[in-house]
Amino acid sequence: MYTLLAILFGRLLLSTVLGAFVGLQREQSGRPAGLRTHTLVCIGSALITIVSESYVGDEARIAAQIISGIGFLGAGTIIREGKTVRGLTTAASLWAVAGLGIGCGRGGTMMWLCVMATFLILGTLGLGKRLEEKILAVQHRNTLCVRGSHEAQSAALQSLTAIGIKVDTASRRRLESGRSELAVRLEFPPGMARERAIHAVMGIEGVTGAAWASSEAEPHAG
């Protein structure tokens, strides 16, 4: 009996450690669901899995119910701010640690699989964020902001296309002064300097300024 208790406690202990590792990463990132939340989710999933082994029935249904329940908890971490949605990664990490807890609760080789999965989860949360930032930095670097009238901005798009620059996306926002700014993400042909885009739009009548989104300097005055 004591041996069995030690084995089951070992499963819970491992779920505590693995859940804490993931929760600590979220805590350091300043997310609302951090160390305690992720740890408790992992422990609870493991405990429910262990308890379900004492019942006669389909244990897979128990695991499915755990995942469904975590879905409601994860939904509480998702916040919409205007056009921005925050908390999706935290919701996914809660769902992932629930899987870790289920695996730890099953014991055996599943526990080793959970340890390896934890490294993959931490790698995705850490290295994946850096990779996203690099990709966004490149996209941001090639985003040109054009100020002026709508007609001038439309002419700027035509001018950019005429010299072989591809317009990937374009979005317009209204400034406090009542004017508008057109943000255009560009794809340059091989060998073309970025400044060609600036020169192409600044010669258009009605364009009052143009600058790269990543630039801290004021737009070039027209």
Image (cartoon, grey):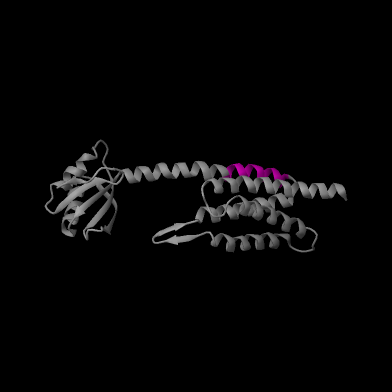
Residue at x 66% of width, y 60% of height: 66
Residue furthest to the right: 1
Residue at x 65% of width, y 55% of height: 41
Q: Where is residue 42 in the image (x, y as percent from the top left)?
A: 66, 53
Q: Where is residue 102 in the image (x, y as percent from the top left)?
A: 69, 53
| Relative horizontal placement of residue 63, taking residue 95 as reference (left or right) | right
Residue at x 54% of width, y 53% of height: 90
Q: Where is residue 119 in the image (x, y as percent from the top left)?
A: 60, 41
Question: In this rendering, does residue 29 appear at all?
Answer: yes
Instruction: Tell me if residue 108 comes above or below residue 80 in the rendering.
Output: above
| Relative horizontal placement of residue 97, taking residue 158 as reference (left or right) | right
Residue furthest to the left: 205
Boundaries of the magenta span: 109-121
Residue furthest to the top: 191
Which image quarter: residue 57?
A: bottom right
Q: Is the magenta stretch mostly helix, strand or loop?
A: helix
Residue at x 83% of width, y 50% of height: 5
Number of marks: 0
| Relative horizontal placement of residue 20, taking residue 161 as reference (left or right) | right
| Relative horizontal placement of residue 96, taking residue 183 as reference (left or right) | right
Magenta-drawn stretch contains 78: no
Which image quarter: residue 177?
A: bottom left
